[in-house]
Each structure stands twice: as C-alpha cells, then as structure tokens.
Image (tube, coloured by chain):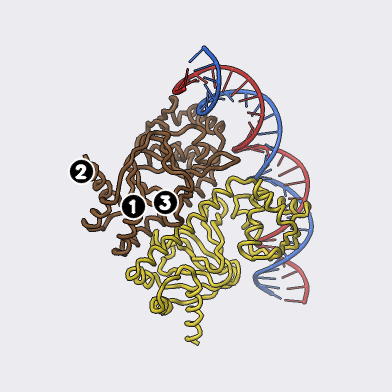
Chain colours: A brown, B yellow, C blue, D red
Amino acid sequence: MKDLASLSCRDCINSASLFEGLSFEELDYLVQHASQKSYKKGDIVVKEGDLVNTISFLKCGLLKVFKKSPKYHDQIINLAKPNDCVGLLSVFSSDRFNYNLTAIEDSVLYSIEFSALKHILFTNSSFGLHLLKSISNAADLIISQTIEISKKNSRGRIAYCLTSFAEEIYHRPVFYLPVSRKEIAEMIGLTSENVIRVLTEFRRDGIIAINGKTITILDIERLKYVEKNG
Amino acid sequence: MKDLASLSCRDCINSASLFEGLSFEELDYLVQHASQKSYKKGDIVVKEGDLVNTISFLKCGLLKVFKKSPKYHDQIINLAKPNDCVGLLSVFSSDRFNYNLTAIEDSVLYSIEFSALKHILFTNSSFGLHLLKSISNAADLIISQTIEISKKNSRGRIAYCLTSFAEEIYHRPVFYLPVSRKEIAEMIGLTSENVIRVLTEFRRDGIIAINGKTITILDIERLKYVEKNG
DNA sequence: CGCGGCTTTGATGTTCATCAAGTAAAGTGG
DNA sequence: CCACTTTACTTGATGAACATCAAAGCCGCG
C-alpha cells in the first residue's frame, strides 16, 4: 500500500513540468519527502495565513484560489487545475499563504516538503532557473488575465469564463459547472444577478444550453467573438 | 571616468536588496558586467517584444510599465520607482519583454547582463532563493494591487493613486504629478474626464489643492478614509 | 417538513462612459 | 518671437451598463 502511494507520487512528480531535467536520484529524493492528500468538494485546503512548508500541485480535481474580504464578497483569483502548482507565489514570497484554497471538486494534492525542494535547489542551480521561469510564468498569466478581464464588459467576461471552462479545464463543450453563479461573479467582478442575466441571454441567443449546472456550448465561434469584442 | 562609473555601479549594486548576501567577488563580477544608461523624460526604455538580455533596476527617476492595446487605451500596470527591479517578471518567463517601459521622469537605469546573473546563480544557489523571493514579492504586489483597485469606486481609486504618489513615491504631501490625467485614468481603469471630476471634487472638499500638475494633500486622513471606503 | 442558501426575474437607481464644446498650455515652424 | 497646430485639461449633458433592492420559486439538508 505504501509502495503504491510512493509509486503514484513518483508518477506524479515525473509528469510535472516543474521537475523536468532532474536526475533519478533527485526525483527519488523528492518522492521520499512527498505525500498526497485527498479533499472532498467543499473542503478547505489552505487558509490565508497558514504556514507554508510544502510546495504542492494538483493531481486531480479543481481548487479555487481566493482572497477573503471583510466587507465585500470574496475575490476569486484563479482556479487551479490538474498539474498546476498551488501557491507557487506564496511559497517564496513569505512563510505564510496569502490566499485561501478550497476544493470545488474532489481533489488530490501532492505536497513536497519545502526543505527538500530547497535541498535540490542548493545542489542543482539549473533547477533554480527552472523554478524562476515557472513562477514568472504563473505570475505573468494571472496579471495579464486580470488585465484582460477588466477591459471587458459583462458579456465578454462571461464568454471568457465559459470558454476557459470548456477549453482550459474540461477540454469539452459539455461540462458540469463546478462553481455557483455567485462564484462566477466573484471570479470576474460582477454580481450573481448579472451573471445569470448574461447566461440567460446567451441561452436565448443559442450560444449555449443550460441545464442546471450543466452547460453546453453550442456555438463556440460566436462565444469567442463575444469574448473578443466584449 | 570609467572608474567613477564603475564605482557608482558598485554603490548601486551594493544598495540593491536583490544582491544582499553576495560576496565581494560576486559583486565585483556583476559590476564588471553592468552598465548604466540615462533616459530623458518621455524616452522609450523598452518596447514590448524587445529581447531581454539584462536585468535592470532604476537608480533614479520613474518609469511607467504598460501594455499597448490596439483598440482601447494603453493599460498602465505599475510605476517603477528607484531601486525597483525592472521587468523582473519578463526576464525569466520569456526571452522577450511582455511590457513597455517609458521614462516619465529623467531616469538612470543600471543593467546587469543576464548571463552574468546566471553565472552567479549557478555558483551560488542561495542567491537563487533570494531571486525567487524577490520575484514572488513583486508579482504578489502587482496582483494584490490590481485586485484591490478593481474593488474600489472612482473616488477610492483616485484616493489610492494620490496616497501612493505621496507616500510610496515622493514621501511628501506636495508633489509634481509626473503623469497626465489620461495616464492616471490608464493606471486605475477610468476615463480622463472622470479622473478630472473626482480631482475637482476632492479639491472642493478641501482634501487636496491643485495647481496644474502640482498636488498638495491637505487632509491625508480623509483621503485614506475615502481610499478605504471607496 | 421547514429552513437557508442558490437561482431567477423584474423594477429602480447609481455610477461611470461617452459625446460635445470650449479653454488653457505646450510644442512647431516660419 | 509670434502665429499656428496640437495636445492636455475642464465642464456639462446624456445615455448605457451594471448594481441594488425586492419577491418568488427551487433545491438540498438537517
């Protein structure tokens, strides 16, 4: 049983682009300092202020990364999908998480002790460069997404949201929405009422079909047009 | 003359927190692969798509970091102040700049060849960790600023903008605005008309005084209240 | 079975963008 | 140095987009 778990850890680490270029010995070392943990939909994975002592990435499932706001709604920063590194930013910038993580699907997380990662970093500096690239990319992505979103109107934002579910996360035109309308609103800076209104509009226009939480994208071209010109 | 230039480079590198913990030899090595360049207000420092082969930081002056938009206005991402590392994100995430840099005050930039930095990185891995921290912090800051701004109304955004000029950049309540009203608008996602309207409001409310491009903050408490509750 | 949260729709209001028009300032060429 | 052009700034009027408020139906869950 222990071996199976190790094995799957090893597989997971092998497949993570973050660890490309490491030797077998280094990978083994990481596996020996790694563990996996499962979370049910709705479970809290990390709370803002929690100590960071591992670097984690998502094997399967979906997490929402968000900041709590005392007065307003929460602000969802992005969704972490399988193979994404979780909290890559926080790991280095402080010893505590700046964000909250919650599972919005049943999820499995692989965690490598930060000290083990540092050990590799100290003995293999090209790994450091690799890490730098990964972090820069992750940050660049979040920044440019946020900027792009903020330039769009409500229709453009919803279109953006739907296409990324279909293309980035589920890789198919029919999917079960893992988030509530309110959470969509928190992702793209709208109110839940307006999210609903735009979704209804898209349905009436024949761009999508809605069945509760199941969305079918009927006209991806039109959706992308709206995303671009919204 | 050459020695003087070296010396000032050395001073500059010494004072940059990025290079804390490096040995004298390592610092010397960096200095030997560094150069400085001056820019006049309005000069283009870097264009989106330019090759990145140095890592630079601002000795003095002020730069605006922005993305061009074909249809809309430009989007100003942040302002780089003295001692800020410029394009720290782009350096590692790609071999080309993702952003434009323009001097909005007369500025002096120190640039270290990226290859020299890599050399240090390969021989000193704690420097890698240090770099990771710097990049994470820079990214974290931009992300949280962008999120904070997007939650505020127009008054809150202008208040944010004014307090950061007074406290982060100029460290005094009276300052000459280095940017046009239009550029303020591009920083905080408003139109120039509304920037002007809110500034006039603040003036009428006795929160600030305006004399062309010179702003005097009369009531910082009230300004911060507006920033917080806007 | 009833409570609370999520969803939906409609009515209303606020905020901000857009349009328009005029003034001030700053750069340009003779 | 002055006419000329252009760009920045300012104010008002109008409209569109989105938030807010309200009410009702739905669903899941203790």
**Is residue A83 placed above or below D8 in the rendered structure?**
above
Residue D28 in picture, x, y percent from top left = 44, 23
Tag 2: amino acid: Asp
Residue B176 in picture, x, y percent from top left = 68, 66
Q: Residue at x 43, y 34 (%)?
A: A42
Instruction: Say the numbered circle drawn on residue A3.
Output: 2
For the N terminus of chain A, which image quadrant? top left
Q: Are marks 2 and 1 in contact (CB under 8 Å)?
A: no
The residue to which callout 1 is attached is A113
Tag 3: amino acid: Val
What is the secondary structure assignment of the residue under circle 3? loop
Residue A50 in picture, x, y percent from top left = 45, 47
The residue to which callout 3 is attached is A52
B5 relative to B105 in the view: left or right: left
Alpha carbons under labels 1 and 3: distance apart: 9 Å
B114 relative to B105 in the view: left or right: left
Report the front residue among B34 and B222: B222
**Is residue B77 placed above or below B174 in the rendered structure?**
above
Alpha carbons under labels 2 and 1: distance apart: 19 Å
Q: Which of marks 3 and 2 is nearer the N terminus?
A: 2
